[in-house]
Amino acid sequence: MTRDELEKRNVGENLDALMNLDPRGYGVCRILYAGSRAFTGEPLTMHAAQVLYESVKENDLVYILVGFVLLPHRVPEMDGTVSAMLLARALVMAFNAKPVIVCPSDSVQAIEKCAAVVGLHIYEDLDTVQELPLSMGVVAFTKDKAAAPAQAAELAARKPAAVVSVEASGANTLGVYHNAVGKDVTEMQAKSEALWNLLRTQGVPNIAIGDLGNEIGMGTIADHIKKYVPFTDKGECQCGCGGGILSATKADNIITATCSDWGCYGLMAALAYLKKDMEILHHEEMESEVMRVAARNGFIDMTGSLLPGIDGFSTRMNVGIVSLMRQCTAYAVRFSHNSDHWFGPVLAKHFFD
């Protein structure tokens, strides 16, 4: 291991630790991390950021799949969408790319309102997105399973450079979509995994971010999740299908975190480190403003509240996570070689081999 490899690894370890803080205390995030870390073999955030770093170039399309519609109000939740908007900005900052949010129709209006907060123009016409600077797109993906393959093929034909899924609902092996406690929510969800699966078969680099197991990509570590996470195995859901809540969809790269947004923040921070540009990761003020605008336009917290919150965590908590990620990563970027007299002796002891 070289000096730079050690620094990169430990920045990734910091970000992975921050995105898996467990204020609730029941440990699901740590269970998931054990499985996803074993699958990946290195810090998840830095590994996924490296995928984007190597795959995305100027003017490339990047699809961001997002949007979980919740009972009983039948409206989308904040988790996933907040970080998807900020990831769109990060992709423009890092690569001058063309991010496109793919979401349920329920999410489109709020996403269009949030675009201004992250400094981007937003269009539903993807030709316009590809033509104009500082632009992002939004596509409402069908909830009709029969119509999904045709829409997926149309979007895949545009040849995106990468696809990222953040808290996007995924069906189990029986084709049933579930909420966290095992109720059937199939009719409410966009069937965007048709696009995910098509792009993956075409070899498009992909990153799936989840926080429980019922999201796109979590089937990657299916055996681990079914063994340790409640409601995920056969017969454990409440809807009667008998299939459990675990998504059957797999991914080539996976991030798991306490909430999906935190995992996506870690991805952006790692990308900022790789590009040596901390402006890629948004500032604290932008985090809180995106949350407020999303809430004012109908997105709900996991609890059902219309007050700004992500999986039960307040604006203050989310701003704190972003702030710690910024500070830890910025220190490594700014003061990278101030401790060089330590790296050689540490490496000589071979702990990190």
Image (cartoon, grey):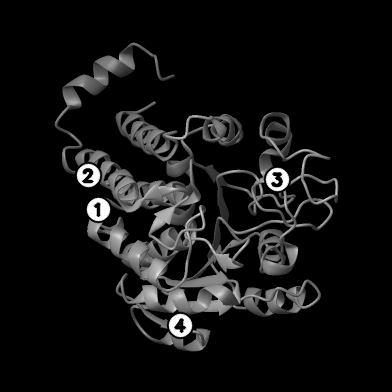
The residue that mark 1 highlights is 278
Provide the residue designation for mark 2: 330
Per the model, the C-alpha gap separating discs 3 and 2 is: 34 Å
Against 230, residue 128 (above or below) is: below
- In front: 53, or 305? 305
Q: State if disc 3 and disc 1 touch (CB < 8 Å).
A: no
Q: Position of 104 compared to 135: left or right?
A: right
Identify the residue at image location x=48%, y=29%: 25
Quick check: 149 above or below 345? below
Circle 3 sits in a helix, a strand or a loop, which is it?
A: helix
Q: How far apart are marks 3 and 4 (CA)?
A: 33 Å
Contact (Cβ within 8 Å) of mark 4 with mark 2: no
Residue 319, percent from left and from top = 29, 50
Do the residues under discs 2 and 1 have CB atoms within 8 angstroms? Answer: yes
Quadrant including the C terminus: top left
Is any atom of residue 261 visible in this view? yes
Identified at 56% across, 55% down, the residue is 167
Q: Which amino acid does label 4 sit on?
A: Gln
Which of pointers 1 and 3 lies earlier in the amino acid sequence? 3
| First in sequence: mark 2 vs mark 1 | 1
Task: Give the x, y percent position of residue 165.
Answer: 56, 58
Residue 77 tag number: none
Task: Answer left or right for 228 relative to 110.
Answer: right
User: In front: 251, or 193?
Assistant: 193
Q: Which amino acid does label 3 sit on?
A: Gly
